[in-house]
Amino acid sequence: MATQVSTESVEKTIYDGLVELGTERDDLSREATLESLDVDSLDLVELAQIVEDEYGVELKGDDVKDVKTVGEVIDLVVAKAG
Amino acid sequence: MTRRVVITGVGAVTPLGIGSDPLIDRWMAGEVGIADGYGRCLDFEPTDFMSKKEVRRADRFTQMAIVAGDEAIRQAFGDEGELPYDRYKVGCVIATGIGGLVSLEREQEKLITKGPKAVSPLAVPLMMGNAAAAAVSMRHGLQGHTYAVSSACAAGNNGIGDAVRIIQAGDADAMVTGGAEACITGVATSAFAAMEATSASGISRPFDARRDGFVMGEGAGVLVLEEKEAAEKRGATILGEVTGYGVTADAHHLTAPQPEGEAAAKAIQFALEDAGISAVDVDYVNAHGTSTPLNDAAETKAIKAALGERASDIPVSSTKSAIGHLLGAAGAVEAIATIEALRRREAPPTVGYEQPEEGLDLDYVEGSAKPIVDGDGPVVAISNSFGFGGHNAVLVLSSVN
């Protein structure tokens, strides 16, 4: 399942997911912090559900507790799926 | 000395439109917001009032409470909504009969079709009955007594009554209070239909001989209450006063009211005693008037028992003839309609009432609105709400000069 996961594909999934959760697309970048986007722990659980649906990767609270930026979320998913 | 409690802001989302003005203007004109057997708030689009994220984080009943709360707080405290009191002295009690049923049913569907991992982490915070009180508190920084009241269709009145007591006790200087309900869902409509509580004809006509059950509605009503002296001191516009509150329980049956309405009559009597008035001082009755055969007969008996001869001299009408039954929001929306009716000194009609039934012989305000008559001073109303489980909650409301 997780053999061909590209960074571009994960980025699109994460960006689309964050927009679905109420973030403005124009505010999104790899450098944007979750705090500046008002993405909280509940949003991260929902985002993890989207990621799991898409890539079969399970993200637990412990996995994301130190994540600060959107780029770090993307890299974490790519690393886990790889 | 008892602290007195006045109303300084009202807000509503009802099947007659967004806002307290369409509620009272349209009901007074005899208009009905019911279509296809339901009182839906068809004009309500939550994204008109809040961000996409706020909408996602609130069940429909909470969204409606937020919008009604914004209106009430704007009216009381101005467009900036800056609180004129210590935040810990302003609380928020919002009632609901059922809570976030739309969210519960959606997540249950996901659980069954996709499994437990598909269930949203928001499921519980969306469905919990206190979600509306919590959301309004967070939105406006209200940090005093904040919780939900749940007593089925009496909940709106219990919420307001509790808020009054909290102010009277000195625990708050102001309260944001009311009720919200949005459960026109598969489970709720099926259950009410199965118990034959809802109308097969889809027509809400309280007290009429042809009435055949209630029509489900949805919406929210929110009021801002303040301690009278503090409100006067800050120059607030006072819309009316909550002068009395009476509560009893039937201890009789899960869904049916006591047929003779004894406990309901007692609640009216307690409310009048609390207000320090007697039956002759009551100028208008905003009835619970659900349009079920049992309620409207028992309530008529209760009104007669509590008010005696005065019952025949004053107008008695039901808001539910115009908007259906808003369950846990009903009392709050009806308190708003009542206070506005008192301000206009006009009793809105029981829309659609035409055919009297033997024993149901009060003045139900047939046809069109009529004057509330009692000299030039303040006029007084009682507003009844009764709920499944045998809950009876009655408010006494008064206009101010």
Image: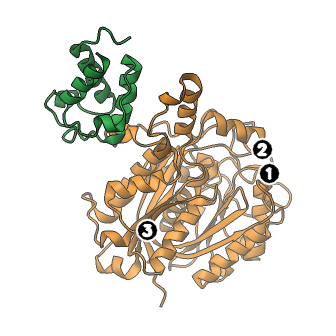
Chain colours: A green, B orange
Q: Which residue is mark 1?
A: B293
Relative to residue B97, is residue B239 depicted above or below?
Answer: below
Confirm or deny contact between disc 1 and disc 2 (CB under 8 A): yes
Q: Position of residue B125 (x, y in %)?
A: 46, 46
Q: Position of residue A26 (x, y in %)?
A: 17, 28
Among the 4 quarters of the image, the one containing residue B79: bottom left
Q: Is residue B40 left or right of residue B262?
A: left
Please tell me which of labels 2 and 3 falls first in the chain: 3
Q: Position of residue A21 (x, y in %)?
A: 33, 32
Q: Which residue is mark 3?
A: B145
Q: Which residue is mark 2?
A: B212
Q: Nearer the viewer, residue B371 or B272?
A: B272
Q: Taking the image as drawn, is residue B138 in sight? A: yes
Q: Which mark is residue B364?
A: none
Q: Is residue B74 left or right of residue B171?
A: left
Q: Could you confirm whether marks 2 and 3 are on the same chain?
A: yes
- Element type at mark 1: helix
- The number of numbered discs placed on residues in the rendered structure image is 3
Q: Nearer the viewer, residue B44 or B165?
A: B165
Confirm or deny contact between disc 2 and disc 3 (CB under 8 A): no
Please tell me which of labels 1 and 3 falls first in the chain: 3
